Amino acid sequence: MPSIPQIQISQQPALIGIDADLGQQDIRQPRATYEMQVERPKLDIRQPRGELEIDQSRAWDALGQGPILTALSRIYSQCHEIAMQGIARRVEDGNRMAAIHLGGNAIAEIAKDLSISRPQFDYYGEAGYDNVDITYTAHKAEINVTDGKINVNAQVNNPEIDYTRGKLDIYMRQYPKVEITPPQIDFRT
């Protein structure tokens, strides 16, 4: 039986070539801008001086160096009593001179007593260990505080992004083809 000639068909597929390099991405994040201002607290302390008062008028009065009006007032208040003592002494001296029958020299004795004793006025103030009055008035300290503060100014900086595109080459590595090979025909027969 005669053979049937056959057609031969061969295919070659298409091949695509891709040459790609990755892109490069560069990201930088600058630090935030940060400013801080400090206002320090203030402390103001003022201490007013205290007041010291010394009153030594009673001490000077006790030494007999006090005000003259006070001394004269004391003498005046004692005058009545000294006058009464003087009258009593005169009466007593008169009674001594009248007692001649007792003997003695009454006039000489009275003269002797007069030369020794004289009326004493007490014009001094009262003496004491606490005659000097000391008064101290303290004043409170004046304290003023001014609060301090911190002013913070922070600003975020945007990131800096740089992108360099990579290489992308697409090419045909092999073109498609179809080959049809006809059979060999023998024309001799």
Image (cartoon, rainbow, N blue to C red):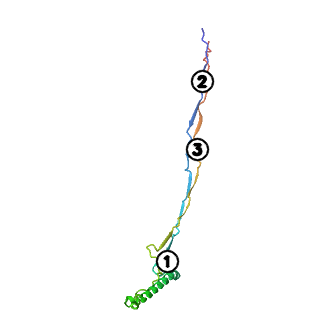
Q: How many numbered discs, if any?
A: 3
Q: CA distance from mark 2 to mark 3?
A: 43 Å
Which residue lies under the disc numbered 1? 57
Circle 3: residue type: Tyr
Compare marks 2 and 1 and give the one earlier in the sequence.
2
Q: Image height check: is 11 above or below 159?
A: above
Q: What is the secondary structure assignment of the residue under circle 3?
A: strand
- Report the front residue among 142 and 5: 142
- Report the front residue among 110 and 173: 110
Q: Residues within 10 Å of mark 1 (few under 14, many from 20)?
A: some
**Going 56% across and 53% down the picture, which residue do you hit?**
34
Q: Residues within 10 Å of mark 3 (few under 14, many from 20)?
A: few
Compare marks 2 and 3 and give the one earlier in the sequence.
2
* Residue 163: mark in rendering: 3
Compare marks 1 and 3 and give the one earlier in the sequence.
1
Circle 2: residue type: Gln
